[in-house]
Amino acid sequence: MEKAKILVVDDEPDILEFLKYNLVKEGFEVITASNGAEGLALAKLEKPDLVVLDIMMPKMDGVEVCRALRANPDFDQTIIAFLTAREEDYSQIAALDVGGDDYITKPIRPRVFTSRIKALLRRPSRVTGEVEGDNVLQIGDLLIDRDRVVVRKGEEEIELAKKEFELLNLLATKPGKVFTREEIFRKVWGTDVIVGNRTIDVHIRKLREKIGEGYIKTIKGIGYKFEF
């Protein structure tokens, strides 16, 4: 299998070297940049599979770099993860709002960091057998048939309400991506529909009861993501 190419952008040389060392040890191809502007230029040149961005950087911060990448159709499928301080809720939400897929909090633990990177790279397009045509998604033992609006777990067909199906489909399309509550409301219920604050929580609870507890993870204060 071809090595995934990862671009790491951070203005602290020690952190940059530390992250590169641990990713190379796991078999990834790694390129690095020491500021946002350099990172953006390298991303356009190298077309990495995944970009790791520190938020606070000179010349361009991580949010600006992410916004610029997401404005370019060439990077629609590029995975973007942010490095944030543990208590920076505002930065974490800002990172996700501009198109980031996830954030990793500092201080960084090597095994946790590499595990998160591997999880982000386990997308439907990257796992053999996961995608069976444009409208059938297979993730582990869970199959989502968008045309027939059917979900199967192993041999068992699971009956879901319309919004439960739409919510599961949204989360499962990008395993590892953190969807904010606002993004879920917008994409599943639409901007013209007014629903209560507990609506998402109730649907998530019902989904967990039907498909199992292990698939959908709560990101406290932000939203939800799908894991397998």
Image: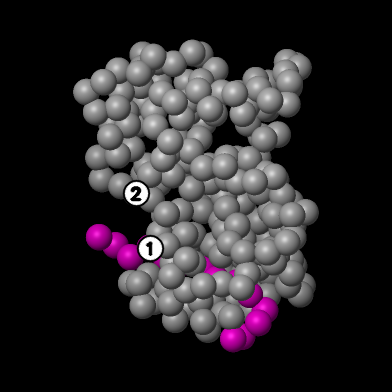
User: Given contact means CB atoms under 8 Å apart, are the residues at marks 1 and 2 in contact?
Assistant: yes
- Image location (x, y in percent) of residue 226: 47, 40
Q: Quadrant of residue 157?
A: top left
Q: Residue drawn 47% across and 20% down?
A: 165
- What residue did someone put label 1 on? 4
- Image location (x, y in percent) of residue 191: 73, 22
Q: Residue drawn 62% across and 61% down?
A: 82
User: Could you tell me if residue 144 is visible in this image?
Assistant: yes
- Going by the numbered disc 1, the residue's amino acid type is Ala
Relative side of 42 to 148, left or right: right
User: Where, quadrant-wise, is the C terminus in this rendering?
Assistant: top left
Q: Residue drawn 43% across and 36% down?
A: 213
User: Where, quadrant-wise, is the N terminus in this rendering?
Assistant: bottom left
Relative side of 75 to 66, left or right: left
Q: Is residue 8 magenta?
A: yes
Range of residues picked out in magenta: 1-14
Tell me which label, 1 or 2, sits earlier in the chain: 1
- What residue did someone put label 2 on? 126
